[in-house]
Amino acid sequence: MNFIITDAWLAKSRAIHLSGRRLGVALCGLSLLLAMTVATLYHWVILKGAREGWPVVGAIVRLVVQDEIEQRERYMRENLDAMARRVGEMQAKLVQLEALGERVSGLAGVNPAEIKTVPARGGALVSGRPLSMEELQTTLSDLDAVADNRVDLLTVVESRLFDQRVRKMMVPTQHPVNGVRAGSAFGYRIDPFTGRSALHTGLDFQADTGTAILAAAGGVVVTQEPHHAYGNMVEVDHGNGLVTRYAHASRVLVRKGDLVKRGQKIAEVGSTGRSTGPHLHFEVMLDGVPQDPQKFLNAGAHLPGMGSSRIAAAARR
């Protein structure tokens, strides 16, 4: 496209040639300039009309602002309602958790009343009216306090249950030889070597040589040595004054100072020391005084939830 520009007297002229690409760029620039001009004028008219209270412009501005406010409030209300429903669900779950915590605390011997409880309040959520932001924040604060309280209770319950489990594992109630019933019982009997009445301080479990001897409870090996009467002997300290003794072993698998677990194989049946044949001589001592091991084994079979102090008290009777 060619443009010819002349002056008023047609004395001078100038020709401008625009190719298709140049023409397109020029039209785009012109359109952009026109749009910016219109936007600037519109913005100026709206602002000036709003400041000076022009009737038509003021009405338009008020409608636009009111619509924006209504949309914002509608969005906030929808979100608040959704959050309120979620908070209501959380309240219901916390009530279930509280009931569960009370049942479990009973099993652990913990009185929930000993721990300060914070009641969950949910009236605002079930009243059927819209919640305000302040009410929602208050309810969330209450739920947070209730959750903290439940955490404290369950932490105490966990600690108590763990302590009970540890004490149970440290009480000698595990049979030291699987599948073998005790033969010679605890108490006075005729000594097979002297033919006289003598106190038999433990239980005898007759078994083949090499049969596994198991720790009756978890503890620490305090003695592992040959003895003129007990032969190859192991003693395990379980705490609370309880010590078990395993005698006449053909082979010992632990050393002094070793930690052993309940039911762990610590030796093998034999006939070493003062013995008439392969068997395990098993003793339980409380504060150095021999006790009837059968009472401990019976307590473990019939009273699995008893603590070490109660089993020890039962063994004294």
Image: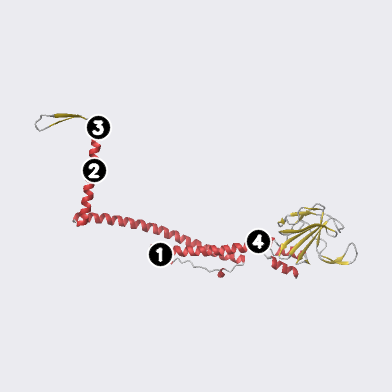
Quadrant containing the N terminus in the rendered view: top left
Q: Which residue is mark 3?
A: 22
Observer-side mark, 3 or 4, equals: 3
Q: Are marks 1 and 2 in contact (CB under 8 Å)?
A: no
Q: Secondary structure at mark 1?
A: helix
The first of marks 3 and 1 along the sequence is 3
Please tell me whether residue 265 is drawn above or below residue 33 in the rendered image.
below
| Amino acid on which disc 3 is placed | Arg
- Circle nearer the N terminus (2, 4): 2
Q: Position of residue 75 (x, y in %)?
A: 36, 56
Which x, y percent locates residue 152?
Answer: 55, 64
2 or 3: mark nearer the eye: 3
Q: Amino acid at mark 2?
A: Ala
Q: Give how far apart the Cα atoms at labels 3 and 1 are.
A: 65 Å
Identify the residue position indicated by label 4 in the image: 165
* Front one among 63 and 272: 272
Q: Which residue is mark 2?
A: 35
Q: Earlier in the sequence, mark 1 or mark 4?
A: 1
Looking at the image, is mark 3 or mark 1 nearer the viewer? 3
Residue closest to the far left: 9
What amino acid type should be assigned to the residue bearing mark 1? Glu
Circles 2 and 4, Cβ within 8 Å, touching? The answer is: no
Amino acid at circle 4 = Arg
Which is nearer the N-term, disc 1 or disc 2? 2
Image x and y of residue 77, in percent: 37, 58
Residue highlighted by disc 1: 135
**Tag 2 and tag 3, C-beta contact below 8 Å:** no
The mark closer to the camera, 2 or 4, is 2
Tag 2 secondary structure: helix
